[in-house]
Amino acid sequence: MKTVLLLSYLLFIAPCMANSELDDLLDKIDEVYRSKSSYAEMSMEIATPHWQRILKMKSWTEGLKKTFITILEPKKEKGISTLKVENEMWNYFPKINKVIKVPSSMMMGSWMGSDFTNDDLVKENTLREDYFYKIIKKEKNIYTIELKPKPETVTVWGKIHLVVDAKKFIPLLEEFYDEKDVLKRKMVFDKVAKIQNNLIPLRMTLIPLDKEGHKTIIMYDKIRFDIPVKAETFSMKNLQKRR
């Protein structure tokens, strides 16, 4: 059995192992919204056939391991915050003054009733470290990369097709398939702008294909990279701070 698994691994990943450019591309895609550190102000629009609401948020990141997000509006959700450090994640709810740890089994659960999962928001998994990958299509600078989770990767997806602009180092589209190879959702990246000499898609639209009329849009109103971020930003004390 180990021999079969090793052979499958080599057949899938070997063509990419020699391609350091693909490794670099995946690293850059992972860091599009983060870099060494980042600060962002954004809105999240959650739409269904029956209702719609908009959240206003701020976020701070440090590399791929630390994330802090707090909700500013609406008043009902103001102060709800999320902290992720390494592979651990917590949510704080000021109305009940309680911190709830998010177990690994819930990383694929919905964040604040949106179509985004906890993992989508804080990116527990990284493309190059947590997936086997290979290029399955090339059209000039547009690459389609197939990613399959490693056995230890916590995810509900059987595979992901990632479409990127390899020249501009930006994602264009992500397609998520279940274990039966059925396309379940897609995420579209657009409204590209130049931020600190980097091209960034300022809008992400997530569409679940099994929920007609549902979608969630994240729009970056402001984003800055490689800025000083205090270490205490990613602390439990800051998570429980009333705002």
Image: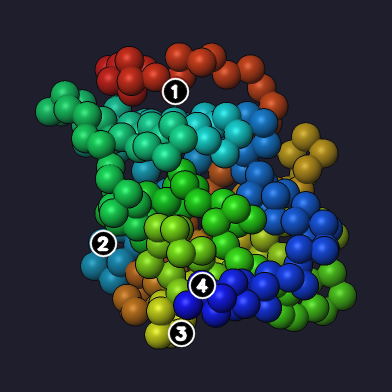
- Residue at which label 2 appears: 51
Image quadrant occupied by the C terminus: top left
- Which residue in the structure is indicated by mark 3? 181
Question: Under tag 4, what secondary structure?
Answer: helix
Dot 4: few (<14), some (14–19), or many (≥20) neighbours within 10 Å?
A: few
Residue drawn at (51%, 64%) of the image: 150
**What amino acid type should be assigned to the residue bearing mark 2?**
Trp
Q: Residue at x 64, y 56 (%)?
A: 128
User: Could you say which quadrant of the image residue 12 lies in?
Assistant: bottom right
Task: Give the mark toward the camera: 1 or 2.
Answer: 1
- Can residue 55 be spotted in the picture? yes
* Residue at which label 4 appears: 2
Q: Quadrant of residue 48?
A: bottom left
Q: CA distance from mark 4 to mark 2?
A: 51 Å
Amino acid type, label 1: Phe
Please report whichever mark, 4 or 2, sits nearer to the chain's N-terminal start.
4
10 Å neighbourhood of mark 3: few (<14), some, or many (≥20)? Answer: few
Q: Amino acid at mark 3?
A: Asp
| Residue lying furthest left | 96
* Label 1 or label 2, whichever comes before in sequence order: 2
Left or right position of 59 against 194: left
Picture coordinates of residue 162, whole percent (x, y): 63, 68
Provide the residue designation for mark 1. Answer: 234
